[in-house]
Amino acid sequence: MREVLEGSQAVARTVARCRPGVVCAYPISPQTHIVEALSVMARTGELADCEYVNVESEFSAMSVAIGASAAGSRAYTATASQGLLYMSEAVFNAAGMGLPIVMTVANRAIGAPINIWNDHSDAMALRDSGWLQLYAADNQEAADLHVTAFAIAEELEIPAMVCMDGFVLTHATDVLELPTQEQIDAFLPGYEPKQVLDVLHPTTIGTMAGPESFTETKYLQHLRFLDAADVIQRWSDRFHDTFGREAGGLVARYDAHTFDRDREAPGANAEDIVVVAMGSVLGTLQAALPELRAEGIPVRLLGVSSFRPFPGGALRDALGDSRHVVVIDRALELGSGGVLTGCVGRALAGTRSRIHSVVAGLGGRPILEESLRDVIRRAHSRDLPTLEFMDLKAGGIPRPPVGATEVAR
């Protein structure tokens, strides 16, 4: 049944229907509505057979999730921004111990200066922590991704972050269709932990590893990540076959004319400009790009749904023969350029692709349709620098950013 819901409420209801055994929470904007809703459901009994644990910090939240998962429970938490950084030591531990925790990250900027609005700098700061990172383009996908995230994490024994743009999605109201309890029970296998602490059979998880074995443990994590892309795509395909809509996967293709998501969309031609982006900006791009095609500018759209593992092969296939790539980045690698751009560049190493990094929307600055059209028009006329800070207020800035004067031709 379709209903009008805030994004946070949709996520909370969907998580509850995935039957977590332990939910641990410490509130921080903009994820607070998610854990508040789960606490109400736990109190009223709608979230049954689940221990809801209020903790005193984000570090404690992840520590409780680690303990719960190691003891054999399906574990869930949520955080954002400084909260994610505060729990970072435990985030790395969860991955190294192979615990399939699922966590919602309501993406928010990292300070200083303090900023509570949306960009991707929080999850990007922990992009190499060993967690899967799945990005939602809209609230329907944000809810649906949690169903597949539990399945993927538990099959791979890798924890998973479901990243949804703070405020832009968490506090936005949409018409959504949530999977029912019966549908999720039929789709998501019951949790059967592959390693579990048992007082009758004592063992140690996450023990000390010296130089003689640490490299091998990291190599095993690496191998597991190499397997992750196929597992992510398989569960995404199964979700599509079951529910009739897209959720996650590796790369989202958009039809070049309607800009609706289309898994059968062909690769781009050599002269096409392909815009690559991640998160809710994909919706703004869907609205902005048809006008450019009406002007005769051949532009296509790709969304990165799985940032970790990064889908280099799927991205190359989706790009087809295109040699003009514009990456819209919501996080900055200081002294270099956009974080997503760096991953795209490595994936396209050895090709003739011209890659432009467009850093946009930092700290919640609005990403305007006309600003997006402007950078694409300049890319089409070969007048876009390799590094562009969209809508940069130049007054008082002593010199242009490194790379800003370099125009790829």
Image (cartoon, grey):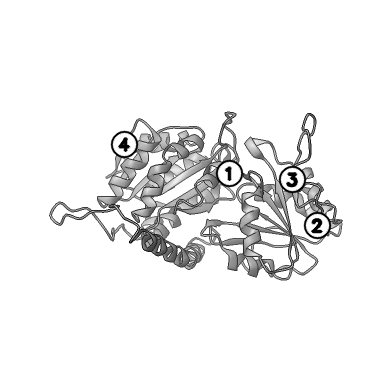
Distance from disc 3 to disc 2, alpha carbons, whole Å, reads: 14 Å
Q: Residues within 10 Å of mark 2 (few under 14, many from 20)?
A: some
Q: Tell me the kind of residue under disc 3.
A: Val
Q: Nearer the viewer, mark 4 or mark 3?
A: 3
Viewer-side residue, 398 vs 84: 398
Distance from disc 4 to disc 3, alpha carbons, whole Å, reads: 47 Å
Residue 376: x and y in percent read 79, 52
Distance from disc 1 to disc 3, alpha carbons, whole Å, reads: 22 Å
Q: Residues within 10 Å of mark 1 (few under 14, many from 20)?
A: many
Q: Which picture quadrant has residue 23?
A: top left
In the image as oriented, which residue stretches furthest toward the left?
A: 200
Residue located beneath label 4 in the image: 53
Residue located beneath label 3 in the image: 402
Residue located beneath label 1 in the image: 120
Q: Residues within 10 Å of mark 4 (few under 14, many from 20)?
A: some
Residue located beneath label 2 in the image: 408
Residue 378: x and y in percent read 83, 52
Tell which circle, 2 or 1, labels the residue nearer the N-terminal end.
1
Tell which circle, 3 or 2, labels the residue nearer the N-terminal end.
3
Secondary structure of the residue carrying tag 1 is loop
Residue 56: x and y in percent read 35, 30
The disc label shown at residue 253, or none:
none
Tell which circle, 1 or 3, labels the residue nearer the N-terminal end.
1
